Structure formats: structure tokens, C-alpha cells
């Protein structure tokens, strides 16, 4: 990997500096952080490196950081550094997906060896993803935004077309539909993929500090401003800025943001100096901004400036046929995230999932998948553990056949062909496991 790098996170400055120096002597490219917050801005499906983090840190600890990284990409190697008393915690982290852990005190050679193996693994993952994309197989975009309905096929096509450009983009969709997933996909397939991805929740910014948070400030700009500070816009230079729920941005701030969009410059609070800004802006909204313009709550000129490239993320009610397949993928992801064995989902549960309404969209469906994997819910019944090998194998086989039936809409020929069995064998196994192809057909 030509751009391979290590993101080193440790709140102890002396240890952080000495570790970075030792790794640089071993020919690694190292970027250091005192906390995990900014690390997440650099993580994406195309991130070509490894994260090394201390477990015990104020604020976001190493375990939390690892979990957030795995939510973005489960295959980014995370190496945790632990004190003697944290070994049990580190072993727990290994079960939950950490690549490895190093116990203090450690030698630079030991850490370098673990990192090299992790780098090789990450390189193989990225190479495999690239080869699949070149071969026309299921790529990262389809893995992150699965679905065979036409609205999802169209969405992925538009993401690939817009993502390669540098166009500012507006993403519209219901709560939980996956707007931030789309935004990250746009960033990861762009030329800015190796630069920061800064997500800003416009609804959560404190009104009295919003300008300072976005534009930064100089000393004395307001009471309590004792030192200069980069704003989030400036911190994201070279990368992508996501303005989540831009409809919540205060009306008076919208005019200032419009100037930033048009001129690509900012001025910190308390300064007349103009700072050039090389970023791509992506905005999301769950409300109809055109209606907000008509109501006088959103600037028309800002709306039309943002509306050059627009992506509409469909709700689950608009792609109901995708729900069973999506649920099965979320179950697999949850099993990997929690370090559990693959879970066989009973066909009656799949059928029920496909027929239910999901007002919370993908977010609500993901929570249901997590509960099933954790044994908290199984379609209204408590999950039962298969005790013997025969029962486990039978349950797995039943789940594979049910999943294939769902994937092919109840059509039997592609099912037995994809599974490599005869039509007669498929009929026998469906009868054995009580599977009915009519249960696997969902309405589009």
C-alpha cells in the first residue's frame, strides 16, 4: 500500500511522541492524536492503514473508538495498547473485533511486527475489494447500500456518477434511511477519500457558539477566547464537510454559509484575514427544503445553490422487497460486530420482517437485527440454543435455504442452481424444514 499509514492515539504526550518516533524509524508513516474524535474523520472504506490506540483515555476510550471504527468499516485493523490490569478488557476487545493488543511495557520491534501483519491484512482487503469492483462484482457501494429494487439501483448509479466529481451535494431522505451512509460513500469514492470527513450536526450545535465552531476564532473574539482555534470548516481542508440536517441551521447563519459555498473562503471570528477553503460540502435534510423556503425558514438562494446535485434516499416503505435481504445482511454484520457465530434466521421471522412497517427505516431494522443476534428477540420469541452438532447443522442449512429463497423471490430454479443441489433435493429439504416458497415472496 503506497499510502499506508498508522493513526496513533494516546492521551499521554510523551509516550505518544516516543512511540511515533520509533515507528517512523521503522519506515512507517504515523499521524498522532491525543483523543479518538478526529480519528473517525479519517476512517473510511478506502482507508489504507491501521489504528493503534490506548484503551484507557479520558472522553472516548479505546474500546468505544474501536466500536465506532467498526461501524464505518469492520475490516480496519485496530490494535489496542493496554496496561497490565487491562488484559481481561483487551481479551474482550479481541472477541469484539480488535485485530490484536499490546501490553505495556512493549518494545518498538514487537509493536512494529504486529502493525506489519495488520498492514498486510488491510492491503489484501483493499486489493480484494478493488478486484471485485473491476470484475463488475458487488462493490463497496452495493455492500453499504444493498438492495435489488430499482430505486436502490438508481441511487447507486447516481452515487458513482456524482461521487467521482467534486460537486456539492444535497441528500434528502427520512430519518434513519441512510443519508450519512450515502455521504460517506460519496466521500470514499472521491479524490478526497484520504482527507478528513467532518460530520456536523446542525441541529446539535449550541446557538451561541455555532459560528465559532464552524469558522474558528482569534484570541479576544469573545469572552473566554484566550487562544486561536481552527473551526470545523478549516479543519476539514482537502476533505469533505457533511452538514447533517441543514434545515436546522439558523437563518442568519445561512447567509454566511452561502458566501462560503460561493467563494470558498472563510474568516475566523475576530479576524479580517481571508482563509482559502478547499472542501467539498454535502448537506442532508429530512424535511422538504422547498417547503421551508416557501415558509420563510430557509433561504431560497442557499437552497438553489445546494440543489445542483441531489440524491433521494428511499425509505424502507419505498423498497419493501429489499427488507428481508437487508435484514439478513444486518444480522451477519451484527454477528461479526459482537463476535457471535453466524445466526440462522427462521423463515417465519424473515417473512414477518418483510411484512412489518419500519418507520425508523434502516436504523430501526439494524436495532432489530442486533437484538436477534444478542438473543434478546427472535420474532417475538426467546432465542433457543441448538445443543447438538446435528441440530446446529440443520438450523444452519435451513437458514441458508430460506435466505436463498428470499434472495430469489421464491423462484426455485435459481435457488437449487446457486446451492449446487438438484431440484428433487431442494424439494425434500424444503419439506423437511417446513419451508414454503410463498412465504419468501415480498411485494415491491
Image (cartoon, helix red, strand yellow):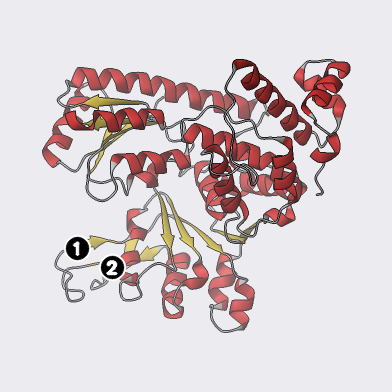
Q: Residue at x 69, y 35 (%)?
A: 346
Labelled disc at residue 319: none
Q: Residue 260 location, x and y as percent? A: 42, 67
Residue 78, can we see it? no
Q: Secondary structure at mark 1?
A: loop
Labelled disc at residue 268: 2
**N-terminal of the two: label 1 or label 2?**
1
Q: Residue at x 60, y 16 (%)?
A: 389
Q: From the viewer's perspective, is 389 left or right of 235?
A: right
Q: Residue 211 location, x and y as percent? A: 33, 71
Q: Residues within 10 Å of mark 1 (few under 14, many from 20)?
A: some
Residue 142 or 66: which is nearer the viewer?
66
**Quarter-of-image position of residue 407:** top right
Q: From the viewer's perspective, is 179 left or right of 151?
A: left
Residue 130 or 342: which is nearer the viewer?
342
Query: Taking 352 as reference, is 134 above or below it?
Result: above
Amino acid at each position: 500500500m503506497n499510502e499506508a499509514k498508522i493513526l496513533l492515539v494516546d492521551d499521554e504526550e510523551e509516550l505518544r511522541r516516543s512511540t511515533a518516533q520509533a515507528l517512523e524509524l521503522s519506515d512507517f508513516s504515523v499521524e498522532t492524536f491525543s483523543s479518538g474524535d478526529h480519528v473517525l474523520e479519517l476512517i473510511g472504506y478506502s482507508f489504507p492503514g491501521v489504528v493503534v490506540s490506548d484503551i484507557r483515555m479520558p472522553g472516548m476510550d479505546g474500546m468505544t473508538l474501536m466500536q465506532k471504527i467498526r461501524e464505518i468499516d469492520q475490516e480496519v485493523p485496530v490494535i489496542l495498547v493496554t496496561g497490565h490490569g487491562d488484559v481481561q478488557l483487551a481479551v474482550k476487545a479481541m472477541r469484539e473485533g480488535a485485530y490484536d493488543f499490546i501490553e505495556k511495557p512493549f518494545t518498538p520491534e514487537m509493536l512494529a511486527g504486529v502493525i506489519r501483519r495488520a498492514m498486510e491484512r488491510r492491503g489484501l482487503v483493499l486489493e480484494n475489494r478493488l478486484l471485485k469492483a473491476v470484475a463488475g462484482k458487488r462493490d463497496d457501494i452495493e455492500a453499504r447500500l444493498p438492495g435489488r429494487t430499482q430505486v436502490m439501483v438508481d441511487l447507486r448509479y447516481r452515487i458513482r456518477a456524482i461521487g467521482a466529481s467534486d460537486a456539492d451535494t444535497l441528500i434528502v431522505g427520512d430519518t434513519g434511511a441512510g443519508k450519512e451512509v450515502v455521504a460517506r460513500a460519496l466521500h470514499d469514492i472521491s479524490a478526497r477519500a484520504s482527507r478528513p470527513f467532518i460530520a456536523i450536526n446542525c441541529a446539535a450545535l449550541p446557538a451561541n457558539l455555532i459560528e465559532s465552531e464552524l469558522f474558528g476564532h482569534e484570541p479576544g473574539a469573545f469572552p473566554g477566547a484566550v487562544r486561536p482555534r481552527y473551526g470545523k470548516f478549516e479543519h476539514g481542508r482537502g476533505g469533505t464537510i457533511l452538514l447533517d440536517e441543514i434545515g436546522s441551521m439558523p437563518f442568519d447563519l445561512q447567509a454566511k454559509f452561502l458566501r462560503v459555498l460561493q467563494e470558498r473562503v472563510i474568516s475566523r471570528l475576530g479576524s479580517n484575514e481571508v482563509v482559502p477553503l478547499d472542501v467539498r460540502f454535502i448537506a442532508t435534510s429530512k424535511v422538504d427544503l422547498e417547503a421551508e423556503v416557501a415558509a420563510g425558514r430557509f433561504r431560497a438562494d442557499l437552497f438553489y445553490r445546494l440543489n445542483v446535485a441531489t440524491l433521494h434516499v428511499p425509505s424502507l416503505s419505498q423498497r419493501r422487497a429489499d427488507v428481508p435481504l437487508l435484514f439478513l445482511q444486518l444480522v451477519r454484520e451484527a454477528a461479526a460486530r459482537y463476535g457471535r457465530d453466524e445466526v440462522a434466521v427462521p423463515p417465519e421471522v424473515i417473512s414477518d420482517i418483510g411484512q412489518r412497517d419500519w418507520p425508523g427505516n434502516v436504523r430501526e431494522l439494524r436495532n432489530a437485527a442486533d437484538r436477534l443476534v444478542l438473543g434478546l428477540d427472535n420474532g417475538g420469541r426467546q432465542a433457543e440454543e441448538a445443543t447438538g452438532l446435528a441440530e446446529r447443522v440443520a438450523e444452519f442449512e435451513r437458514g441458508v435455504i430460506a435466505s436463498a429463497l428470499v434472495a430469489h423471490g421464491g423462484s426455485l430454479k435459481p435457488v437449487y442452481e446457486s446451492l449446487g443441489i438438484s431440484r428433487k433435493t431442494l424439494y425434500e429439504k424444503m419439506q423437511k424444514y417446513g419451508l414454503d416458497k410463498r412465504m419468501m415472496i415480498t411485494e415491491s
